[in-house]
Amino acid sequence: MHLPDDAHPTDPRTQRAADRRRWLRAFNLSLGFVLVLLVVFTLQGSVDLRAWAVQPWSAEGLRGLLGAPLLHGSFDHLAANAIALLMLGTLAMGLYPRATLRALPLAWLGSGLGAWLLGNPGSHHLGASGVTHGLMFLVFVLGLLRRDRPAIAAAMIAFFLYGGMLMTVLPREPGVSWQAHLGGALGGVLAAWLWRRLDPQPPRRRYSWEIEDEQRALEADRTDDPLEPPSPHDVPVLWKRPADDESTTVLPFRRRGD
């Protein structure tokens, strides 16, 4: 899929500085969210926040759609999700800042809805793993849809680090909310489809060999098409008026409307 970008490439130093600022901002935002999770986990020891977990098919459990991703059952649970959020959040926000901001609410609510609709009544679902699945599926599916070099590279990195999330959307281990994983993943896939063109490719300098290849491809397409007229330079001249011949007169064509 071609993503047009009419912007002219900036100076390489300026472009590299802008890229560093964008990736640093993505890392800081991901780190800030991880710190929020750490603060909430600390409060869980003194404040009962179980009412904010998702309770399937319970009206009170609907509050978990907002609060469940902030809660964790143990420090190991928090650490695993924090590392995934830091890495996948930086990757997604650094490469697709606009699409990621719109994808996060879908992954957040999707994880809660998946747990509420598919979970067993009486169970409690909490944790940010649904959001991490949404980020992973967002980056992976955008690589399949966009198919440009940065998108493919990001999809390969996400798959190399967390490709196992393709399997954790199905029931495998007891006590693991695969329902939240599935809901978050569906939110990421939907966001990738809706906003796949929202972040254009950054402008870059084009090399001379790239321009020559495009020109050769255009010429090859023209010669292969039997209905395409040849280039004016390729049409042979059947008769050329001598420069000293004044016996003939060239009549101009009238324009329409004259």
Image: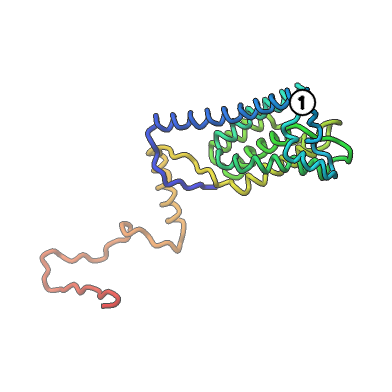
Q: Pointer 1: residues within 10 angstroms few (<14), some, or many (20+)?
A: some
The image shows residue 214 at horizontal and vertical percentages of: 42, 46
Determine whether, in the image, residue 216 is placed left or right of residue 42: left
Determine whether, in the image, residue 86 is placed left or right of residue 168: left
Q: Quadrant of residue 192?
A: top right
Q: Quadrant of residue 61?
A: top right
The image shows residue 169 at horizontal and vertical percentages of: 77, 38
The residue that appears at 31% across and 57% down in the rendered structure is: 233
Residue 143, placed above or below residue 20: below
Q: Quadrant of the C terminus?
A: bottom left
The residue that appears at 75% across and 32% down in the rendered structure is: 127
Question: Which sits in the foreground, 72 or 22?
Answer: 72
The residue that appears at 52% across and 28% down in the rendered structure is: 24
Q: In this figure, which colouring scheme has been used for the structure?
A: rainbow
Q: Amino acid at mark 1?
A: Gln
Which residue was labeled with disc 1?
Answer: 44
Q: Quadrant of residue 126?
A: top right
The image shows residue 161 at horizontal and vertical percentages of: 66, 28
Determine whether, in the image, residue 108 is placed left or right of residue 239: right
Name the secondary structure under disc 1.
loop
Residue 233, placed above or below residue 166: below
Residue 8, placed above or below residue 70: below
Question: Which sits in the foreground, 10 or 252?
Answer: 10
The image shows residue 252 at horizontal and vertical percentages of: 22, 73
Determine whether, in the image, residue 146 is placed left or right of residue 11: right
The residue that appears at 49% across and 41% down in the rendered structure is: 201
